[in-house]
Amino acid sequence: VLGSPRFENEIALRTGLAGVATGLAWTPVGGDILFIEASRVPGKGRLTLTGQLGEVMRESAQAALTLVKARATGLGIDPELFETSDIHIHVPAGATPKDGPSAGTAIFAALASLLLDRRLRSDTAMTGEISLRGLVLPVGGIREKVVAAAGAGITQVLLPERNRPDLEDIPETARRQLGFVWLKTVDDVLAHALEPRPETHPVVVG
Amino acid sequence: VLGSPRFENEIALRTGLAGVATGLAWTPVGGDILFIEASRVPGKGRLTLTGQLGEVMRESAQAALTLVKARATGLGIDPELFETSDIHIHVPAGATPKDGPSAGTAIFAALASLLLDRRLRSDTAMTGEISLRGLVLPVGGIREKVVAAAGAGITQVLLPERNRPDLEDIPETARRQLGFVWLKTVDDVLAHALEPRPETHPVVVG
Amino acid sequence: VLGSPRFENEIALRTGLAGVATGLAWTPVGGDILFIEASRVPGKGRLTLTGQLGEVMRESAQAALTLVKARATGLGIDPELFETSDIHIHVPAGATPKDGPSAGTAIFAALASLLLDRRLRSDTAMTGEISLRGLVLPVGGIREKVVAAAGAGITQVLLPERNRPDLEDIPETARRQLGFVWLKTVDDVLAHALEPRPETHPVVVG
Amino acid sequence: VLGSPRFENEIALRTGLAGVATGLAWTPVGGDILFIEASRVPGKGRLTLTGQLGEVMRESAQAALTLVKARATGLGIDPELFETSDIHIHVPAGATPKDGPSAGTAIFAALASLLLDRRLRSDTAMTGEISLRGLVLPVGGIREKVVAAAGAGITQVLLPERNRPDLEDIPETARRQLGFVWLKTVDDVLAHALEPRPETHPVVVG
Amino acid sequence: VLGSPRFENEIALRTGLAGVATGLAWTPVGGDILFIEASRVPGKGRLTLTGQLGEVMRESAQAALTLVKARATGLGIDPELFETSDIHIHVPAGATPKDGPSAGTAIFAALASLLLDRRLRSDTAMTGEISLRGLVLPVGGIREKVVAAAGAGITQVLLPERNRPDLEDIPETARRQLGFVWLKTVDDVLAHALEPRPETHPVVVG
Amino acid sequence: VLGSPRFENEIALRTGLAGVATGLAWTPVGGDILFIEASRVPGKGRLTLTGQLGEVMRESAQAALTLVKARATGLGIDPELFETSDIHIHVPAGATPKDGPSAGTAIFAALASLLLDRRLRSDTAMTGEISLRGLVLPVGGIREKVVAAAGAGITQVLLPERNRPDLEDIPETARRQLGFVWLKTVDDVLAHALEPRPETHPVVVG
Ligand SMILES: [Ca+2]
Ligand SMILES: [Ca+2]
Ligand SMILES: [Ca+2]
Ligand SMILES: [Ca+2]
Ligand SMILES: [Ca+2]
Ligand SMILES: [Ca+2]
Ligand SMILES: [Ca+2]
Ligand SMILES: [Ca+2]
Ligand SMILES: [Ca+2]
Ligand SMILES: [Ca+2]
Ligand SMILES: [Ca+2]
Ligand SMILES: [Ca+2]
């Protein structure tokens, strides 16, 4: 399956760097978690997509990048970064074909995390299509995805507001373990998925 | 179906930013509304098209962009914008294949709205092929599209003048709810689809 | 069929701007007229072709552009224009596949009209393959094309000199309505298809 | 068939400009003559190939261009031309697929003629593959090609030296009409195919 | 099979230059060793991949390059190198199709070796997928690969930590011959695969 | 077959310029010799490959070029040449598809000969795959290739060291005619295939 971690503490390992988001996938044999890895190297503004991503998922990554670029100033990202960097998005496992629009929120989160240099929470997974203007659109497979998240030790899931009716299909055990955030916009994603900044203690000069 | 909103107030939400037009689509199971989203980021004049758009629809987007560029000065758009921006057009839902020339007027409207930074009316939907010189050409599926517009709470539809004979096929209920604008050129689109500018109250210095 | 106008006065409407030529097409159900639309926007010398044009027709457009470029000075076109413009050729209806070399004269005429900023006559339609050095080569379907031109209200048709033997196949009614120009070179096309320049009245200063 | 002229004086018309060579083609229904048209416009060194040329013929054109470039100085061609021009090679009839390496000598001759601005003889046709270093290699279909040349009024044919054994297959009538030049290198092509330069009469100042 | 050496001392020959890593491959007829060759020439930052590499393996090479670029400073590689070089990765035998993600660690090692200009150990072979952020992910075929390594005279194999459970499947004879290194990150690869730097003897000036 | 010369003295003709190597090919109907032609024209570092070369052979040419670039200084080639030239490799006969990695040594030899401006020996033919770091790897069809070389008047063949066991399959007649050089690296190729430099007689000034 899609790069499923064998040990729960692996999620912390996988998301230990800024630029890695935990997504949720639907597969014919059940839900799974997957990691969206984004990396930035000096370059000329190119976008590289690897991990056997299908056409819809590639378009989703392009939309996520446009969204981050269009909101750069608001997010606190230096717009110059995009001209002087190449961005690479990879989704292990490398040999497993993946497709669909539902990783949009996770790709957006990975890119924002990378460019803000702020890690994403390792207890949090997400699914949701994004619109080009930043709305979160509903996706399928909510039940299977949420069950997989719970099984992998996740404690917070970010789901599209418009999938709220799917809550009733989620088994009680998973609902007890998990906190649910219902997403209207990609701003909601960052509000709940980025690790809190370390507190800055004011220095008092006496 | 094509990104159909589940709630009527969603159209306002979807079109709340400049650069989003409400189009009308024909599908084998009836008409539908769809949102054309255009976004602009710093760049070098590239055009990105996503949303599983077929070849005819991609060509239609290219024609709409040429049309906006050729009329930039007349529309009040700074021609420099095109050289220093990348433009991205996306049509949710990301996984749904879409094709055909009939979104031409909506793509033109989305681009003009984006570049004028003026929102489009959320009560208005449109269909129509465009010629490269700005004429609006007739399209099929008028009946289904108009019924879908009415069902989604739209109150004004913009249709090609040359589709006027199709008016008689539209059910009475839809005709009562809707105002019809018959389009000869893309200028007619903007005249009826752009939100009015906020009035500027003259400041009187006494 | 190929963007057939429903009303005769539509040809005037369609060709009301410089850059639009009226061509003649053969289809399995008879001849038709079609409009070649050319547009120019600030750019870097790119050529965009839309309207579901097949490979032969795309090559024909490339040849027409080379021909206009090679003759720019002779035609009175500023050669700098090609470096600082992108040119877009579109042939409505956008969803109808089109192919074949016989639109060569019309594409040449549309490009020359665009770059000279002189309109083409709305009473004139044309067919003919072009060679890269400016000769007009014979094409098929003359009878069907000429009948369609007559039916659309055209009064002058431009045909390849080497198709003159096909004249005898044209019905008497069409022959009475139409003037025929037999083309040897693309210079003959412009001589008969461009609208006359408005007369300049000499200003006499007394 | 391949752009066959209907009248013998057409060859003079077709080759009336520098940059047009008369080639010989083999088709399933017999030989034919075809015209290789080369044109040069201000540009950046691009090569455009049109006329429904197959992969082998396209490679042949690339080899011919490399050959002309590599010999530019020797031929008297300004090497700067290649950087500041785009070259377009077209082979009418535009809708007829063509392929094979045997037009190599004719493509070379068209390019050299174009860049030297010297016309090729209208009484001369040629066939022969070229090597990248300028040798002429043998081709098939000599009998059919030569008969077609004779039928079109050609009086001199240029054939690969290594096809000399095919001479015996050529009918007596064609052999009486034609002069044969047997080619070892592309220099032999130019020696026999370029029109003689006009004599320059010395001006005697008394 | 995949470029299998016929003599054991060939591995030393093949890896005698910086930039060549010894990988392990699974084939339907058993494991095999293969050489990943990386070369750098003056250029503009292009990546060339040859050796009939499938899509997954090509993506794996792109990820390895991003990883080396992102860690350049930490590894002691001048980041300027990437802009002024073209990098070529080739995997003999040239005619044998290869695919899969498991050469990730070996491609990373070859690139780091090349750019550090430090040779890789000729007694060491490796297998393992890489994540874009530098983790080593598990792969299949461990038993066959390790048996092949032993048969080729390798004495140290680098395997993903997460493949440790596969150790029990490896035959006793191979386990006796080989040292095993279990990889968590690509740093572990370099720590065990790079040849030790030659000792620098301090120069004592008396 | 693959451009087989009809006369033995043709090899001297074909290889009479620097940049042409004599390779050996295996075909279903026996071995054959083929000529690798390399040419250099002013340009920007592009590589053009023609002669209906398959994917493996194209990759082989890319590896040969990287190898020449990486060794330029050692070979005495000005590295600036690569930036200011386009290189074209062609393998007649233009219509014959060719593939496989075994022309690697001959492509390397042609490129080195071209860039050193030193001819290759016309009595010498070669086969052998190359690694990206300059090793010569074994190939198939040695018996057929060597017999063809002998039949074409070749007197020296360069074969991969690792094909030495195939010597016993070569017929006695061919072995008597031919000298065999067994190649370990591409340096061995140049040592035996380049024509000796003309002796420079010291000029004694008395
Ligand atoms: Ca794929
Ligand atoms: Ca999905
Ligand atoms: Ca698609
Ligand atoms: Ca439609
Ligand atoms: Ca198409
Ligand atoms: Ca036609
Ligand atoms: Ca074709
Ligand atoms: Ca041929
Ligand atoms: Ca392949
Ligand atoms: Ca594997
Ligand atoms: Ca091919
Ligand atoms: Ca071979």
Image (tube, coloured by chain):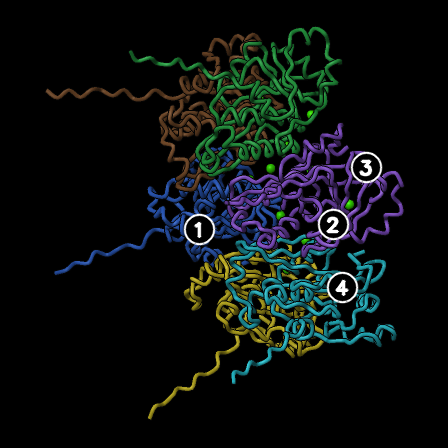
Chain colours: A purple, B cyan, C yellow, D blue, E green, F brown
Quadrant (top left/top right/bottom left/bottom right) for the C terminus of chain C: bottom left
Quarter-of-image position of residue F109: top left
Quadrant (top left/top right/bottom left/bottom right) for the N terminus of chain C: bottom right
Q: Mark 1 points at which residue?
A: D44
Q: Which one is in front in this view, the residue at disc 2 or the one at disc 1?
A: 2
Residue behind label 2 places its C-beta within 8 angstroms of ligand 2? yes
Q: Name the residue under label 4.
A: B11
Q: Is residue A81 left or right of residue A157?
A: left
Q: Which one is in front in this view, the residue at disc 1 or the one at disc 3?
A: 3
Q: Is residue B122 left or right of residue D19?
A: right
Q: Mark 3 points at which residue?
A: A150
Quarter-of-image position of residue D68: top left
| Circle 3 Cα neighbour tier, 10 Å, few/some/many (<14 / 14–19 / ≥20) | many
- The answer as to whether the residues below labels 2 and 1 share one chain is no
Q: Measure the C-alpha gap from mark 3 to mark 4.
A: 34 Å
Residue A129: assigned label = 2
Ligand 11 position by quadrant: top right
Q: Mark yes or no: residue F37 visible.
A: no
Label 1: chain letter = D
Residue F55: assigned label = none
Between residues B129 and C131, which one lies in front from this camera angle?
B129
- The answer as to whether the residues below labels 2 and 3 share one chain is yes
Callout 1 amino acid: Lys
Residue behind label 1 places its C-beta within 8 angstroms of ligand 7? no
Residue behind label 4 places its C-beta within 8 angstroms of ligand 4? no
> Is the residue C124 above or below the residue A187 in the image?
below
